[in-house]
Amino acid sequence: MSNKQNDRKIIIFMKRFAFFAALALGAMAAQAQSYDAQLDSIALDSIMSIVELQEIVVKGQLPNTRLKGNAMVTKVTGSVLEKAGTAADVLRKVPGMIKKGEELEVIGRGTPIYYINGRRVRDTDELKRLMSDEIADVEVITNPGAMYDASVSAVVRIKTVRRQGDGLSFSTFAKTEQSLRTGKNDPEAQINVNYRTGGWDFFASVKEWEYRTNQWGDLGQITTNAATTEELFKYEGNMKYSWRGIGTHLTGGLNWQINDRHSLGAKVDYAVTTSGDTYERLYMDKWDRGTHVESVNSEGKKWSENPDNVLVNAYYNGNVGKLNIDFNADMFFSKNNEYQDMDETASTTDRKVRAVSTSDNDMIATKLVLSYPIWQGQLQAGTEETFVKRNACNEITGTQLPNSKSHVNDNVYAGFLQYGFALDRNTNFSIGVRYEHAYFDYKDLINHDANLKRSFDNVFPSASFSTLLGKVRASLSYASYTSRPQYWQLSNAMSYHNRYVFQQGNATLKPSTQHNVSLTTMFGMFTVGANYAYTKDLVCNWSEQYNDEGTIRITLRNIDKPQHQLNLFAVASHTWGCYSPSWTVAMVKQWLTLDFDNGSRSFNKPMWVFNASNAFRLPHNWQLELNSEFHSKANYTNVELVNNYWSLETAVQKSFLKNNALTLRLAWQDMFRKGNNDVYIYYGSYSIHQTNTMDFNRVVFTARYSFNAARSKYKGTGAGKDARNRIGSSAK
């Protein structure tokens, strides 16, 4: 049979596959219950960025990190990072990334989206389960191109070591975190199973987890006269907050590698999260123009339910001649129920408040990417469509706050085109454009005057250029982005904080837009980079006085002045014998002036960041680590960090058995209990001063065992990533 005949049969088969897949997904949509899932549990995918361009090559010994198009690629295999522990441990040590508290960020670009072998990571805890010796390399992209959703500002792509062979494989992961402040223990365990035979690949995993977080601090709130700056109301007190979450995550799917040119598959993620024992205690004194008028002791409890959290993905990837086809269809259903009981005892009047918030979310998304080689490069074109329906309801008793009920239809249609090519063996160029049409329909089922319909049409260009200048490798890129408000931020529903502070969304919020230029250079053991961002219509929390008793309503608004931000960073990494250090110094500075009713305030203080990773590779598969992070006093948006933040961690690790199948690791985090925050937040005529003592001082023990390790060949990348993020975890 000829290749053309075979391709025709494949096309006919794929048409039938797509048809029946659409029917199956439609039937599931009619029957499934929708619910609201937490963002980090099963975020949706986008596909891989630009075509794989020829990387910049320097003769002689290559450093661990190199430039490849607009990406910084760090090799893990054969380096000290191979024994770093987990993927999360690796990422904190690669150039361009920093650790802030418990989160990983790309310097100046915020939290990235992650891919493992082209598959979008839906649960970021997966980075803690993937072992470093399974990773081949890591790509950090600070300016993603038109192939990604216009809301994606940074991407990290992880490629694993390709395991060969068929048969059964499995891996187990167990972790326990012991808080040295509270004495509480948080366990986590996961089992992954994979069976491969011929072109078929069957996989499943189950994860159980429990996690607690605690926070202590002091709280101060001040309301001033907008015209005279006179202090009207002042609240002082202390607080305690504790949270406990329990969750189960199940994954199952199959992959069929028809031949070297065609593959397809389907995957289901199911998650249940229960938040219990969310406890808040607050004691406050109220002052009215210098006179003490009231004392309030508030004790509250919150809990939530995220039942039947389901994401279904079906994909096809194949080649017909020189044409590559990548198609993904996603369906997501979520429901969130959130409850709050607040008991306030005051020197004036007592109050019992109960709030119930529910939301139901349905999402359907598709994404098609076509790739074809032209001249010295590759042309990629495609479409992405996302359809979201959301119903939300808020009921509050014990206060005069109104109830709310709303329905949202939000549709986004996108088309993109990108061409990347190599001018010579050392010079690459890429250019792309993305068009998005967004339609938003908000219906307030109680207050019809708040109904709103809007549509947006935007074009997002992008370009990148990389070359070799002597011994210096350089990459210059530009991209434009948008940031759409989360759905709870667009709701007019009001939430109760305490008797002095309420919060409400704003259905009239506009998406913010950003233009970003990045320059990265590499020479020897050094990586130096700069990034400039111009943001228009930045979304910021704002306040207004709700009544004459000093009650404040916090809402959101678009800032009428642009935000300018400059990020600089330098990384030095090398290996001397058994010692492998990686040091990062960065500066993040914004230029932002906000106009309040009583004047203007500038938030221009830069943040200095220093991260140091020090690894010692010892004989017999032992490894010792000493890691530290430091963030200076600074401003970001309308927030002022009053204190310096720093933390120190030490860890020891040992691998056992053949092929290092068993790995044990023991770490002591925030050894000197310095991971605390002291912040001022300015909301116009209202401001908050809060000090937080965080529960970062922990001893963490992890164990991982792998048998006949083989990773799934699943190539589904998902669709509708931005909509999935905007659904979030709030039920407002």
Image (cartoon, rainbow, N blue to C red):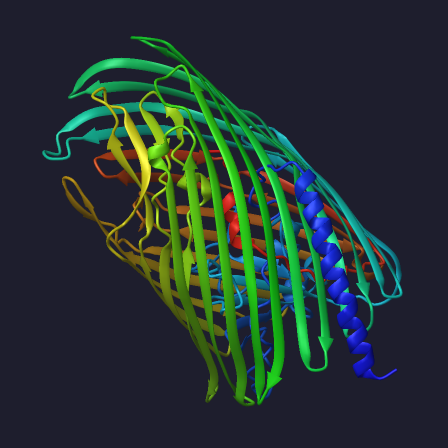
Q: Position of residue 498 (x, y in %)?
A: 37, 23
From this viewpoint, is residue 176 visible? no
Q: Position of residue 347 (x, y in %)?
A: 30, 8
Instruction: Classify 70 as above or below 92.
Output: below
Q: Position of residue 234 (x, y in %)?
A: 23, 25
Judging depth in this view, the residue of 245 and 713 nearest the camera is 713
Judging depth in this view, the residue of 281 and 39 nearest the camera is 39
**Residue at left 60%, top 65%?**
579
> Disc count in the image?
0
**What quarter of the picture does the N terminus occupy?**
bottom right
From this viewpoint, is residue 189 visible? yes
Judging depth in this view, the residue of 406 and 726 nearest the camera is 406
**Residue at left 49%, top 55%?**
412
**Residue at left 17%, top 25%?**
232
Specify the quadrant of the image occupied by residue 224.
Answer: top left
Q: Is residue 55 found left or right of 257 in the rendered image?
A: left
Instruction: Classify 720 as above or below 341.
Output: below
Instruction: Classify 60 as above or below 541.
Output: below
Q: Is residue 562 found left or right of 148 in the rendered image?
A: left
Q: Position of residue 12 (x, y in %)?
A: 77, 69
Extreme residue in the left direction:
228
Specify the quadrant of the image occupied by residue 599.
Answer: top left
Instruction: Classify 168 as above or below 352.
Output: below
